[in-house]
Image (spheres, rainbow, N blue to C red):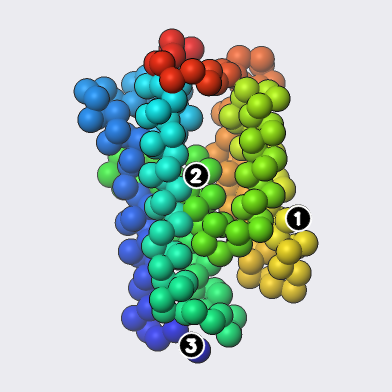
């Protein structure tokens, strides 16, 4: 099966879905601009830090679904059997577009989150075994360090090796994993500086709103 010309416009739709600033909207629903609190990021970690665990989990789930649900539906309904590299490339391009939409949302001056939850959703739709490995390491790292940035960087670094292990020979998937991992590390460069300086915030597991760092 080969995608038609119209289907190659799908990445635009995926970018727009990914660009929905869910963390910002969650904050606004409670009367605050999440960009003015905590780290200033609109991602789930900052929502958790500023508004508490429940809102943080809601933000994470929303961002995850932006990457997972549209791609899963396209994958299962339009291409139940991936039988060509062009189909794989189209799906991968759609996934990348969703991540870029989250990271660089036009609704907030092209400033968005770090793309971890949306990347996880994309991986869940295309490479579930890679997601399983990355998520397992992410959880372990969070429990040990209580520092989400460390856990996210660990998960990002393992994406390409995991893709090579589970999808050996599929160079498009390997490229996607390497790109998603590299982009995630790049988006955490400020966190890396704070880690080196010993000033990176740790996350609390209570459901109450936490104090500002």
Image-based side of 190 in relation to 24, left or right: right
Asked if the residues shown at circle 3 and circle 1 are in contact, with their CB atoms under 8 angstroms apart, the answer is no
Closer to us: 190 or 120: 120
Of mark 3 and mark 1, the one earlier in the sequence is: 3
x then y, percent, for residue 152: 61, 37
Residue appearing at x 44%, y 34% in the figure = 57
Residue hosting label 1: 161
Q: Name the residue under label 2.
A: 117
Q: In 3D space, how far apart are the residues under numbered discs 1 and 2 (Cα atoms)?
A: 19 Å
SS at badge 3: loop
> Can the viewer see residue 70?
yes
Residue 66 in percent (x, y) is at 40, 52
Name the residue located 50 percent from the left edge and 40 percent from the top edge. Answer: 114
Q: How much space separates mark 3 and mark 1, taking CA atoms?
A: 29 Å
Residue at 54%, 74% in the rendered image: 89
Closer to the N terminus: mark 1 or mark 2?
Answer: 2
Residue 187 quadrant: top right
Q: In the image, residue 121 lies at what x, y percent?
A: 50, 53
Where 85 sits versus 147, above or below? below
Q: Local crowd at mark 2 within 10 Å, few (<14), some, or many (≥20)?
A: many
Marks 2, 3: nearer the viewer: 2
- Residue 172: image location, x then y, percent: 63, 70
Image-quadrant location for residue 26: top left
Left or right, 34 with reference to 28: right
Q: Which of marks 2 and 3 is nearer the N terminus?
A: 3
**SS category of the residue bearing label 2:** helix
Is 164 on the left or on the right of 107, as rendered?
Answer: right
Dot 3: within a 10 Å radius of its alpha carbon, few (fewer than 14), some, or many (20 or more) residues? some
Disc 3: which residue? 2
């Amino acid at each position: 099966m080969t995608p038609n010309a119209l289907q190659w416009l799908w990445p635009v739709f995926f970018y727009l879905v990914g660009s929905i600033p869910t963390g910002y909207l969650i904050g606004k629903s409670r009367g605050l601009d999440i960009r003015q609190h905590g780290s200033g990021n609109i991602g789930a970690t900052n929502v958790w830090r500023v508004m508490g665990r429940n809102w943080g989990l809601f933000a994470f789930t929303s961002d995850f679904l932006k990457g997972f649900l549209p791609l899963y539906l396209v994958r299962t309904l339009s291409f139940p059997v991936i039988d060509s590299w062009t189909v794989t490339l189209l799906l991968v391009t759609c996934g990348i577009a969703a991540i870029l939409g989250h990271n660089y949302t036009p609704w907030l001056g092209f400033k968005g989150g770090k793309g971890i939850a949306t990347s996880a959703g994309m991986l869940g739709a295309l490479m579930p075994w890679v997601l399983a490995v990355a998520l397992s390491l992410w959880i372990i790292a969070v429990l040990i360090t209580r520092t989400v940035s460390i856990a996210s960087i660990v998960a990002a670094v393992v994406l390409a090796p995991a893709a090579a292990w589970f999808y050996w020979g599929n160079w498009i998937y390997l490229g996607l994993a390497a790109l998603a991992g590299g982009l995630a590390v790049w988006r955490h460069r400020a966190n890396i500086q704070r880690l080196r300086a010993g000033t990176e915030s740790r996350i609390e597991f209570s459901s109450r709103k936490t104090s500002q760092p």
